[in-house]
Image (cartoon, grey):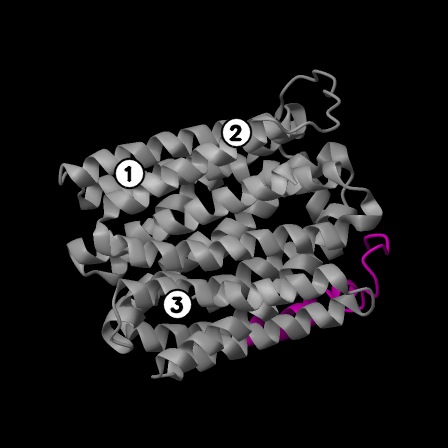
Amino acid sequence: MRFWFGRLAAGGANQMIMVAVAWQMYDLTHSAWDLGLVGLLQFLPALVLVLVAGHAADRFDRGRILATCMAVQALLSIALVVASMTHAVSRGALLALAIALGTVKAFQMPATQSLVPLLVPSSLLPRALAFSSAGMQGSIIVGPALAGFMYVAGAEVVYAVCGALFATAFGLWASLRHAHVPQAKEPVSVTTLLAGVAYIRQRQVVLGAISLDLFAVLLGGATALLPMFAKDVLHVGPWGLGLLRGAPAIGALVMSVLLSRWPVTRCVGRRMFLAVAVYGLGTLAFAVSRSFIGSMLALAVAGAADMVSVVIRQALVQIDTPNEMRGRVSAVNSIFIGASNQLGEFESGAMAAWLGPVGSVIVGGVGTLVVAGAWMRLFPALWRRESLSQPGL
């Protein structure tokens, strides 16, 4: 429960800080390219540090890694408070912040993913992942909405609340106690650093599950363009942006609660692919909607479908991976997730600069459907996977 509440606080703070940064950036530059660049600069540090972060998660106490990440983000929030109050915020400062956040998240994500299996019995892992996701989605709902309303009082108010939430998460995660058996101090080598990559390449189910997230969400994501939709398409202010950012999480929260009570136990492969297809259709519906309520409903449906896919994928990866490899495999997985989110934001921004926000999201939704169909043929073992407990193929 300490892990769960810490994730709630950290997730809410992360969402709030990105809403404020996106709105500040768009106010400063009015550039879709810069909105996408914020996502790209968050992803690049994770790409550079993936092997080191995964090795650290397998060698060191994962709870302490998370606590350290929270302390650094609390300090970054304080710096943003000072910069906003002194009117020192600039395009360069916001891009530098994106790099700093990306560096911290490079270590935070693999530690978070690989810690959950140490806190619950393996028989409860699918429900635990759904319950953990419910907390995360709750923070994604509340965080952006609060940030949008608080931004009216000033960006520094948002950043101050973020700092308090990061500090709360630090306290909770610093007190975590879990089974941690230090590995033998084998020399760090290219082989040990690349062990996670080699493990994934040898297992079709794990590779297919991880790469499906990369390409489907990379193409289908519209998060980076929400400031443009809020301001130029739907004609709402910061409050509307906050609600739009939270809409996918509303659907995801409802679905995660259902999955924690009734987990998917049969036909997991086919249900995962169906969920990805529904996600693509929800993205298309959002692109063509001109109603604020209709747009929120489309995003909520997409979020619910994505949650089904996320829980199945995470459970497959964690169950099919031994604990001594989970940090390195989770680090590689985090790169795929980061690429689908942060790099996907860059792709959306670049595409929107060419086709406009609506055209960009339409192309992304169609791309998601194409990827789902292609992956069924490329990874037949994943398509045929019947249960989560089935050995990886």
SS at circle 3? helix
Q: Is residue 291 left or right of residue 184?
A: left
Residue 44 in percent (x, y) is at 41, 43
Do callouts 2 and 3 mark residues in contact (Cβ within 8 Å)? no
Give the residues in magenta: 369-393
User: Would residue 24 be visible to someone looking at this image?
Assistant: yes
Q: Nearer the viewer, mark 2 or mark 1?
A: 2
- Mark carried by residue 171: 2
**Viewport quadrant of the C terminus:** bottom right
Question: Is 249 placed above or below 194 here?
Answer: below
Residue at point 75%, 62% (across, down): 261
Do callouts 3 and 1 mark residues in contact (Cβ within 8 Å)? no
Residue on which the image places disc 3:
244
* Circle 3: residue type: Leu
Nearest the viewer among 249 and 321 is 249
Specify the quadrant of the image occupied by residue 327: top right
Residue at point 84%, 49% (across, down): 123
As measured in the structure, the alpha-carbon distance from the residue carrying label 2 to the one carrying label 1 is: 27 Å
Q: Could you tell which of marks 2 and 1 lies nearer the N-terminus?
A: 1
Q: Is 320 part of what is drawn in magenta?
A: no
Q: Is residue 207 left or right of residue 304?
A: right
- Mark carried by residue 385: none
* Circle 1: residue type: Ala
Q: Could you tell which of marks 2 and 3 lies nearer the N-terminus?
A: 2
Specify the quadrant of the image occupied by residue 29: bottom left
- Mark carried by residue 96: 1
Q: Nearer the viewer, mark 3 or mark 1?
A: 3
Residue at point 75%, 32% (across, down): 324
